[in-house]
Amino acid sequence: MENDVPFFENFDDFFKALNIPPSRFEGIYVDKLDRLWTHPSLEMPPFKHNFYGIKLLIKGEGVMRIGKWKQTLMSPAVYISPPNQIASCVMKDSNILEYALAISVKFVENHLKLKHFISVFDYFQADKSTPIVVEQEELEDLMGIFDCIYEEYNSDEKEGSIEIMASAILILFMKIKRLHLKYIAANTTLDDNATLKKVDTLSNRFLKLLQEDNQIENSETIEYNIAYFASKLAVHQNYLSSKLKSETGKSAKEHLDAKIIHTAKTLLQQTDLPIKKIASNLNFKESSHFNNFFKKQTLVTPNQFRKEVSY
């Protein structure tokens, strides 16, 4: 494709593209799919959305891409797609069984407990929201919570429905956090876990803002650097840089460079956009500057990376 990846800023446009009915409530969508895949084809081309997507896949075969990771679908498993990430999927067959939940950024902003939970839970950061395979007992637990949300979503009784669903979603997120911590405990060192526990609210707010901010692409109107984020967080840039270095082990520039690489890898892997166009989208004045930056960070050129990850 030669065009940019479509960005769905609201539910209505997204539902129309997927050929599914509109949401019953503003800012939240819940569905239980126990039927044939409803998209016009088995392939959903790359797209971006402005909401949190949570999927509990119980049955289904295919390949899913969210951000820079590519995953042959495993089940049962939890999949999360944070806002402003490029996602796509290719289903192997049309017979699937899953729970699907989507909540808008505005929905999160309107429920302070959800907002706070997401701000301190690093799993919602783009480079950490990889699938979590669950065991049968864990699956039944998650299905029970999804059933509660789904039944309330489809209930004729509207009084208090939003608050009930928001509370159940918070419980769901807490359960996912427990599973995530169990997963990373088995795949990280003691030093890694100690670092995770040290990170405070300010650092997580920065990392969440870095993940959600959509200015990294086509950012011609701003100077996209640490001062930009420090101003948004109402702190001095030196203080923010110091906190990040001491609590995450990485400087602010290293985090920003990682974000650019994450976006670059995603575009190289999920789209056919020319490298010159990707460089321009990421605010590199010359594609040669982008090539040099990418190779310095990854040890391969953008072309080499694209060939390695193509399927």
Image: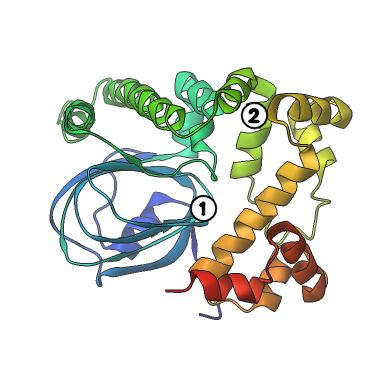
Residues packed near mark 1 inside 10 Å, few (<14), some (14 to 19) or many (20 plus):
many
Amino acid at pointer 1: Gln
Specify the quadrant of the image occupied by residue 208: top right
Q: Residue at x 23, y 29 (%)?
A: 142
Mark 2: which secondary structure? helix
The picture quadrant where one finds residue 167 is top left
Q: Give, as a three-letter code, the residue at label 2.
A: Arg
Q: Looking at the rendered structure, which numbered label has been put on residue 19?
A: none
Q: Is residue 44 visible?
A: yes
How much space separates mark 2 and mark 1, taking CA atoms? 18 Å
Give whichever of 105, 84 is nearer the camera.
Answer: 84
Residue 51 place in picture, x, y as percent:
45, 44
Q: Residue at x 80, y 33 (%)?
A: 230
Question: Quick check: 283 left or right of 145?
Answer: right
Q: Is residue 100 visible?
A: no
Mark 2 = which residue?
205
Looking at the picture, how far across and down is residue 194, in whole percent? 60, 20
The one of 93 and 11 positioned closer to us in this rendering = 93
Kindly indicate the quadrant of the structure image that contains residue 235: top right
Mark positioned earlier in the residue sequence (2 or 1): 1
Which residue bears the numbered disc 1?
Answer: 85
Q: How far across and how far down the image is residue 186, in percent?
A: 42, 30
